[in-house]
Image (spheres, grey):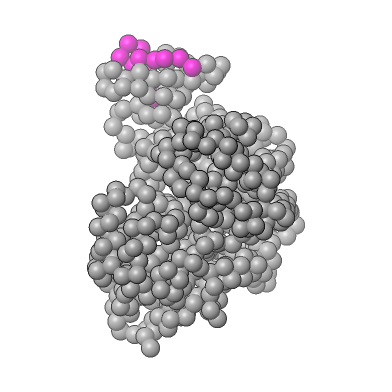
Amino acid sequence: MMRHDDPAVRAALAEAFGFDDLRPMQADAIDAVLAGRDVLLTLPTGGGKSLAFQLPALVLDGLVLVISPLIALMKDQVDGLRAKGVRAAYVNSLVSAPDRRKRLEAAANGELDLLYVTPERFRSPTFLELLPRMNVVRFAVDEAHCISQWGHDFRPDYSRLAIARRLAGDPPAIALTATATPRVATDIAERLELRDPVILRAGIERPNLFLASTRVVTDDEKLDLLEARLKQLNGAGIVYGALIKDLEFYAGELARRGLKTLVYHGGLSGRERRAMQERFMASDDAVVLATNAFGMGVDKADIRFVLHTQVPRTLEAWTQEVGRAGRDGAPSYCELLYFEQDLAIQETFVRWANPTLEYMVGLFETLKGWGERLQVKDVDDLRQELLVKERRDNRVGICLRWLEVLGITQGSFETHDLELVRDLDPNELPEFFGTGDKLKDDLTGLLTMARFAGDELTCRRTLLANHFELEGPSEPCGACDVCTNGSTWRAAHFNGRTTDGDAGLAQDRDGAFQRGDWVKVGRHLGQVVQVQGEGKRVMLTVESASDLRRRKVNPAKQRVERLDG
């Protein structure tokens, strides 16, 4: 039986990944995967989870099929593997149909060692047609907490991966996540139908991270503290917020105080989000203000700080997000600016993520009542019919995904081919639709996060260890706001940031205006919210920082000075 210390495995480790040794839990996981055991592996962000299935893929005869939730994340991983000479590919909705077929044929012909797919791919007829020919020898599920209804990022298609595993020939499986309580770990094992799994749960201990939560009592105090931290901290950093309008407000206020930032959120186009991410990746001191969508697909080891301007929904989410800092092992700073009133924002989000059984049935009956008109309708029509006034209310999207996963609908509003295939039987829906148990559990998770944020007496690492039921520190950790003085720690590890520069954001600019740029039009400060045309025919829509009015600006006729260039 092959093990991690076999010559062939060590040679693959050195040649493809450039490592001479493995971390202890990596070695245990790889041994279990090579032995054909089912595995549940919990390692902190940056702990090297992916190597547990990537290295075996190079020495096993057959294909390792990897289930990943994020398109950007799988692309980054595959690009990195191919650069190392590994035979890897990915298939998702952004790949053209001919290229998808070509990659699937390559997998079926034994020309790949690793194939990354989203869980939704198991509803594709072409994929299911070729799957039996792929000789899948291991089934790897990344971000496995998405399987659990008690996890912090539950996704309907993930809940059906046990069926997908059987369709792939029922190979041994490895489930990986950065954050899982024992309850979530048990749920993952049951839902994926792991057989006598090897369970490996590392502590979430990252000694190079300073962990802090600072209570503020007004929005102005929060903004002032955010400004102070950005001036005290240098290097690349992420500032997380829950609301797009708040992120854009902070960007404007910080710009007026001499701190230039990037902004990343769902209100930007795909091109704009890619541009923001590329600028962040290319800089060693850029600051990005972002919603929690930013970071999962960002493989940047030298992020020096992660700040939260609003409380995350769960302690698991906070742990995962701060884990994006300091993956190179260097000292990094993580702080939550805790404003108790922000809990109401997350409580609303929780309720918008948990439709009731009555809501689901009502939505289905609305679709059914439209009859032949269904294919000329869109999601906004459905929202209006259901009296959904807030676009962040995600109940419509969740219900539509469940109807698709259960095979009740096919097609989509976006492609104008949505149709009902059969009636909905409420009994086939997950039990939590009727009981409200998931809503109660999600609200309990928010309360746990609030207790963590407000605790000023207990070591942060002890609180985290207790939550995840892991062994905590036996003495003060020396790297949290309870165990040591935060200002002393910052002064020892950071030099501070200058405010007269551009925070590393302008080096790769080509001179063209972009949405999100801060500009001076004459003597007035504003932000570019729309760019139309190009070259000498470009027209900007600029929102004034003083009165929030929007004005059309022609740079060819008016003096427009970009503040970061």
Nearest the camera: 184 or 55? 184
Residue 336 x %, y %: 62, 47
Q: Is residue 279 above or below residue 26?
A: above
Nearest the camera: 393 or 268? 393
Q: Tell whether position 441 is magenta.
A: no
Specify the quadrant that holds the C terminus: top left
Residue 233 x %, y %: 52, 45
On screen, residue 218 versus residue 138, left or right, reads right
Query: From which residue to which does the magenta span run?
Result: 550-562
Q: Is residue 14 above or below residue 115?
A: below
- Would you say residue 296 is visible in this rendering? yes
Instruction: Choose top left, top right, bottom left or bottom right for residue 103.
Output: bottom left
Nearest the camera: 218 or 45? 45
Nearest the camera: 334 or 290? 290
Q: Tell whether position 552 is magenta.
A: yes
Residue 382 x %, y %: 56, 35
Identify the residue at horizontal 31%, vertical 27% (top origin): 512
Identify the residue at horizontal 54%, vertical 73% (top origin): 193
Identify the residue at horizontal 47%, vertical 43% (top origin): 419
On screen, residue 370 versus residue 33, left or right, reads right
Specify the quadrant that holds the N terminus: bottom left
- Would you say residue 26 is visible in this rendering? no
Q: Is residue 439 above or below residue 49?
A: above
Picture mark count: 0
